[in-house]
Amino acid sequence: MSSMNFMEKLLNGVEVEWKALWQVTTWDKRFNAVDNYKQPRVINYPYLLAADLFKLEKDDGDIFLLSTGERTGWTTEVLAGTYLRTGEVVTIPWGKSRPVKDVLKYYKGRFVTADNRIATSSDTEKLLNKFLYYWLMSQSIVIDGFYRGSGIQHPSMAAVLDMQIPIPTLEIQAEIVRILDTFAELTAELTAELTARKKQYNYYRDQLLSFPCSSVGMQGAVEWKTLGRIGEVRMCKRILKSQTSSEGEIPFYKIGTFGKEPDAYIPRSLFEEYKSKYSYPKIGEILISASGTIGRTVVFDGEDSYFQDSNIVWIENDESVVLNKFLFYFYKIANWGISEGGTIQRLYNDNLRKLLIPVPYPNDPEKSIAEQARIVAILNKFEALTHTLSEGLPREIELRQKQYAYYRDLLLSFPKPAPDVAAVE
């Protein structure tokens, strides 16, 4: 069914009124003054600075700390003091650090907030606050274009308030909200499930890899060996900045792009020469970030690519003694001996060589590899369930979010009248 046919069926001949946001919403007064905008429906709320909001956090609180950041928390009525509010609100961030769709929030209940732009419907018999929220979400890309200024950007509230919002009947608004709430609740359930599975994964990983270790040597059925006894530290040949370009044949990864998208490349001829003459990782070996985010790991997949020397290293080990994937999981809980003193923390080769690795059943290589493989198989299942974007819960959440965005835009795509017909008070 096309979007127009869907909307025609939903509307069933009912006319949709279009209004400027300033005509149908109430905003915090201080932003009206900042933007010099003639918006009569304003309320002057007391508010906190963003830096002070989470200083109110209490474990046993029942008042929400409403922030446009990722962090959430609760406080108590005593701590909230004069900053306590009760109501149904939508927030647009004052300072922009991410796209609007990632920071726009809806909340209903008791709350304390920082210096965000707070909006509510000025007449809930005409415009539902939850409908307002979903419509603003559908317009997030447009609102992104209203941000201005250098450093911390701020949205032009004059531009936001001049946006035209469709106002169908309350029954149609309520039905749209019901449908979109269903998608949002499903995504929230999947996200909660993912959080629980990640905690479970971390617990089993720590249990499976937490062998007793009082000293180097035999501890029951486990021997703790230094990484230097297991293999050699390797790195690629140094690549000079003058040898790279922003476009090219072979991706060159630095600590800033390690495990992400490359922003530098080297010629294939140089790659083939260095690969044949110097150290180069084998498929399955574990690349380690030795600077920046210390200990971040990537399993080398064999794709033609090159890596920044000394900042990205790997252990060239014998897999008949220790499996690469066993190392990969142990690295996640390893206590890296990080060298201090410089402007950037660094993991030197000597730090790597001293890292202790548990080797189960060291006197029985076959049994040792079998035990390592058993541990790896269990953790692989958790890894696939909780971390990969090609399968498991992250993939399911991504699909549900895309489905939600599709139906949100479909349900809010009302036919708009020509500019000269639009009603303006």
Image: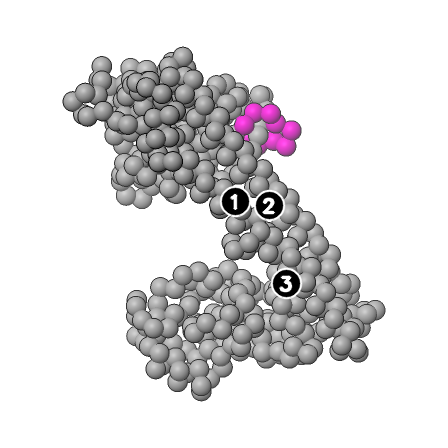
Q: Does residue 63 belong to the magenta stretch?
A: yes
Label 3 residue SS? helix
Q: Which residues are magenta?
A: 54-64
As measured in the structure, the alpha-carbon distance from the residue carrying label 1 to the one carrying label 3 is 25 Å
Q: Amino acid at mark 1?
A: Ile
Instruction: For residue 329, say whether it is visible.
Output: yes
As measured in the structure, the alpha-carbon distance from the residue carrying label 2 to the one carrying label 1 is 9 Å
Q: Does residue 230 belong to the magenta stretch?
A: no
As measured in the structure, the alpha-carbon distance from the residue carrying label 3 to the one carrying label 2 is 19 Å
The foreground one among 301 and 308 is 301
Label 2 residue SS? helix
Please report contact status of discs 2 and 1: CB closer than 8 Å, yes or no. Answer: yes
> In the image, 383: left or right of 291?
right
Which residue ends up furthest to the bottom in the rendered image?
277
Q: Amino acid at mark 2?
A: Leu
The foreground one among 177 and 356 is 177
At 40% from the left and 12% from the top, the residue drawn is: 125
Residue corresponding to mark 1: 397
**Which badge, 3 or 2, comes first in the chain's sequence?**
2
Q: Which mark is residue 194?
A: 2
Q: Exactly how many numbered labels are in the figure?
A: 3
**Which badge, 2 or 1, comes first in the chain's sequence?**
2
Q: Quadrant where the C terminus lies? A: top left
Which residue ends up furthest to the left in the rendered image?
420
When the figure is inspected, residue 30 is found, relative to residue 355, above or below; the finding is above
